[in-house]
Image (cartoon, helix red, strand yellow):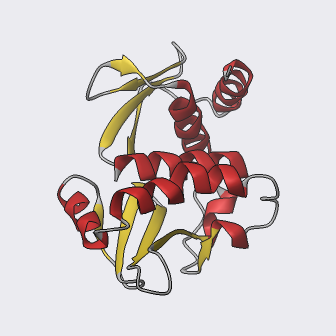
């Protein structure tokens, strides 16, 4: 799949904001350097170009950050609770919820092992929950429930309502998938 059009649009929008120099962005546990003059999103840890889908997400975040991030609302919503997600839920579930259940469904407390390597902390809710700082001002809440005789294990991802003022629906799907991949 080609991301050339989306990347090109993001760089054009960023250039209108006239950023100067190399800009650092922290995404979960990784540092990235955004170089507008060279149109590069580099992983500072590995000194390689970010994958296209990650670069788009980082550029969209940086654009919104330069314009001013919205205040956190404190209202947590699941993906299904956002408007305009028709047609996206199956991809969202397949990329994020299903992998979490596969990995931690039989051992939900195992998710706490990520506390040592991600910017995360224990949270309230479910049988086990984590609050992950994906980007500055973009927290993601993961909740897991143990299975029993009647129901299998379950998981869900919650976003502060303000995320819709930062990312489009496609970006939220990508973000959730990247978060699930780091767990």
Q: Is residue 171 left or right of residue 37?
A: right
Q: Which of the two residues, 65 or 83, is positioned nearer the viewer here? A: 83
Residue at x 30% of width, y 46% of height? 29
Residue 57: horizontal and vertical position, in percent? 57, 39
Total labels drawn: 0
Residue 48: horizontal and vertical position, in percent? 36, 18
The answer to whether residue 67 is above or below residue 102 is above
Can residue 129 be seen from the camera position used here? Answer: yes
Residue at x 51% of width, y 57% of height? 98
The answer to whether residue 175 is above or below residue 147 is above
Q: Which of the two residues, 19 or 4, is positioned nearer the viewer here? A: 4
The residue most toward the top is 38
Residue at x 73% of width, y 68% of height? 82
Q: Which of the two residues, 154 or 26, is positioned nearer the viewer here? A: 154
Residue 44: horizontal and vertical position, in percent? 30, 28
Q: Is residue 13 left or right of residue 155?
A: right
Quarter-of-image position of residue 13: top right
Residue at x 61% of width, y 40% of height? 60
Residue 141: horizontal and vertical position, in percent? 45, 70
């Amino acid at each position: 799949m080609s991301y050339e059009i989306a990347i090109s649009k993001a760089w054009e929008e960023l250039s209108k904001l006239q950023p100067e120099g190399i800009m650092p962005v922290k995404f979960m546990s990784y540092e990235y350097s955004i170089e507008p003059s060279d149109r590069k999103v580099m992983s500072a840890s590995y000194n390689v170009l970010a994958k296209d889908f990650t670069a788009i997400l980082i550029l969209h975040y940086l654009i919104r950050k330069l314009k001013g991030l919205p205040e956190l609302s404190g209202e947590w919503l699941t993906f299904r609770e956002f408007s305009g997600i028709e047609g996206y839920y199956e991809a969202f579930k397949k990329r994020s919820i299903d992998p979490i259940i596969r990995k931690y469904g039989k051992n939900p407390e195992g998710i706490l092992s990520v506390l040592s390597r991600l910017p995360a902390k224990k949270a309230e809710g479910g049988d086990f929950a984590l609050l992950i700082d994906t980007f500055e001002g973009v927290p993601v809440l993961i909740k897991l429930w143990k299975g029993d005789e009647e129901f299998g294990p379950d998981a869900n991802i919650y976003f502060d309502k303000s995320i819709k003022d930062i990312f489009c629906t496609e970006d939220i799907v990508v973000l959730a998938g990247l978060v699930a991949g780091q767990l």
